[in-house]
Image (spheres, rainbow, N blue to C red):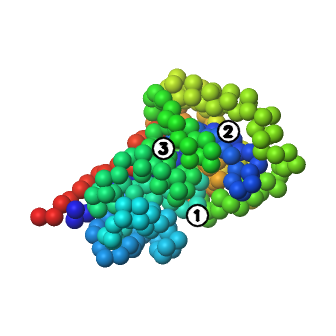
């Protein structure tokens, strides 16, 4: 291959339940993801070593071994026993540290791109195992569409979904670090009980909540889906960034069916009835000047996929 172009979507969390951390420091989660039409594009070209350049959002992100796309390429190279290198060109649309898993989308796209570029021949299941090693949200970026995530969010079960959903995203220039949000969550909760006790106490409610979202997605009715949106991290995100309350209030005033902080924030996702309604909500939210940028997107969309492959002549 001369180059491989792969596109992967950002995500929003329709519902997210989190319990206190286990001994390994991670919080058990249950979440329903939806992939939306805000994308990361990764172009992989042959090179002697692994390197990356970034355009669009996050042009000041690190490009060394701490970059998740670089880590993905290195992990695939090590797993496949390859000595090939790659130069990655990433064009980012998903906000950095925005609760939409842009870095995870980069990693998923890199796994697919390098697998094709190097001809490693790994199947989707093997790539999904590598994805889980890289981060909790990377496996979903591979699958896309709508899915239930359990464990750390990395155990993915596809969820049937009918229809198309229209979202208005309120983006912020300054991101929120996921560890900071979870730390705030822990500080605000009574952690005297173990996570297993909490899971036992709350399991029925969580199963009910997850089931309600799944049923809503099958209904293809955004009015039904709107009643199921929930995020356990929202209160913590609001504590760290109180101005997000203004964003949620602006979405309500704009006539959104419902609004929720996506993941660890600070992106707020407002659900609309249809495309004209989404455009109207977006206009009002832009006028409210509560976000650095307002985007209209749809979901669900496919996960990481090859857009173009160009072979050597």
Residue occupying the far left of the picture: 313
Which residue is depicted at the point 31% across and 57% down? Answer: 120
Q: Reply above or below: 169 against 159.
A: below
Where does residue 261 sit, x and y in percent of width and height? 64, 47
Compare marks 1 and 2 and give the one earlier in the sequence. 1
| Residue for badge 1 | 173
Residue 174, image quadrant = bottom right
Q: Reply above or below: 257 against 102.
A: above
For residue 35, which numbered disc appears in the image? 3
Disc 2: CA contacts within 10 A as few (<14), some (14-19) or many (>=20): many
State which quarter of the image contains the C terminus: bottom left
Which residue is depicted at the point 53% across and 29% down? Answer: 217
Residues at discs 3 and 1 in contact (Cβ within 8 Å): no
Q: Secondary structure at mark 2?
A: strand
Q: Could you give the CA–CA distance between mark 1 and mark 2, rounded to whole angstroms?
A: 24 Å
Q: Could you give the CA–CA distance between mark 3 and mark 1, rounded to whole angstroms?
A: 21 Å
Residues at discs 3 and 2 in contact (Cβ within 8 Å): no
| Residue for badge 2 | 230
Where does residue 230 sit, x and y in percent of width and height? 67, 39
Which residue is depicted at the point 83% across and 52% down? Answer: 188
């Amino acid at each position: 291959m001369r180059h491989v172009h792969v596109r992967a979507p950002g995500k929003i969390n329709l519902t997210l339940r989190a319990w206190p951390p286990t001994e390994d420091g991670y919080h058990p989660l249950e979440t329903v993801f939806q992939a939306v039409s805000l994308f990361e594009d990764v172009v992989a070209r042959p090179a002697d070593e692994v390197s990356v350049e970034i355009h669009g959002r996050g042009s000041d992100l690190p490009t060394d071994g701490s970059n998740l796309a670089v880590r993905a390429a290195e992990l695939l190279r090590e797993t496949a026993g390859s000595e090939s290198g790659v130069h990655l060109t990433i064009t980012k649309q998903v906000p950095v540290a925005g609760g939409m898993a842009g870095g995870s989308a980069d990693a998923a796209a890199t796994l697919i791109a390098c697998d094709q570029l190097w001809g490693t021949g790994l199947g989707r299941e093997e790539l999904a195992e590598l994805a889980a090693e890289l981060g909790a949200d990377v496996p979903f970026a591979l699958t896309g569409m709508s899915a239930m995530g359990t464990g750390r969010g990395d155990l993915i079960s596809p969820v049937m979904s009918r229809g198309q959903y229209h979202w208005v995203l309120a983006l912020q220039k300054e991101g929120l670090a996921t560890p900071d949000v979870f730390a705030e969550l822990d500080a605000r909760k009574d952690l005297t009980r173990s996570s297993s006790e909490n899971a036992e106490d709350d399991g029925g409610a969580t199963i009910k909540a997850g089931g309600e979202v799944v049923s809503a997605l099958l209904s293809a009715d955004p009015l039904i889906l709107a009643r199921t949106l929930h995020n356990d991290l929202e209160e913590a995100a609001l504590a760290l960034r109180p101005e997000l309350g203004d964003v949620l209030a602006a979405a309500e005033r704009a006539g959104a069916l419902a609004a929720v902080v996506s993941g660890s924030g600070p992106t707020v996702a407002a659900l609309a009835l249809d495309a004209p309604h989404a455009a109207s909500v977006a206009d009002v939210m832009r006028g409210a000047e509560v976000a650095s940028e307002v985007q209209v997107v749809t979901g669900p969309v496919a996960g990481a996929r090859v857009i173009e492959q160009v072979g050597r002549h």
